[in-house]
Amino acid sequence: AKMEDGWTSDPFTLTERDDKLYGRGSTDDKGPALSWLWIVEAHRKLGVDLPVNIKILYEGMEESGSAGMFEAIRDLSKGGQFLNDVDFFCISDNYWLG
């Protein structure tokens, strides 16, 4: 991303303008990734227990096929590993429309 690509602000600096956030990856994937953390933070600040257990696993290879991701999930889901007690996965690689 370069200024000459049509950006009106530095694409690598999150910029608020007209109550909207602009920046490289702000909707795909940084925004969705941060929203999970904001949910946890909001519950903690309000003193409200989360209704589920949450484990967050980020990966940054989605643009090139997520090489190794399925193997990592398989391996980390084995007994005693980080994901062994996870019941559901939510993949946040999407565009948020608003």
Image (spheres, rainbow, N blue to C red):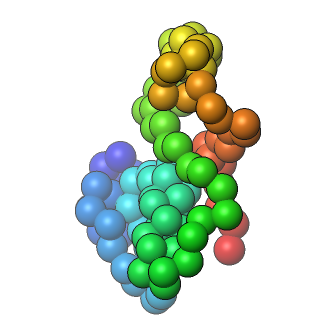
Q: Which residue is at 57% across, 16% downward?
A: 79
- Using the image, determine if residue 56 lies above or below residue 23: above
91 or 42: nearer the viewer: 42
Q: How many marks?
A: 0
* Residue 36 position in % (x across, y down): 53, 59
Task: Please report the residue visible at 52 percent of the width from the left and 43 percent of the height from the top.
Answer: 55
The x, y position of residue 63, in whole percent, is 52, 29
| Residue farthest along the bottom direction in this orientation | 18
Where does residue 92 sit, x and y in percent of width and height? 62, 47
Q: Is residue 28 visible?
A: no
Q: In front here: 23 or 70?
A: 70
Outermost right residue: 88
The image quarter in which residue 91 lies: top right
Residue positioned 50% across, 20% down in the render: 80
Q: Mark yes or no: residue 45 visible.
A: yes
Does residue 85 sit above or below 24 in this rendering? above
Nearest the eye: 68 or 89: 89
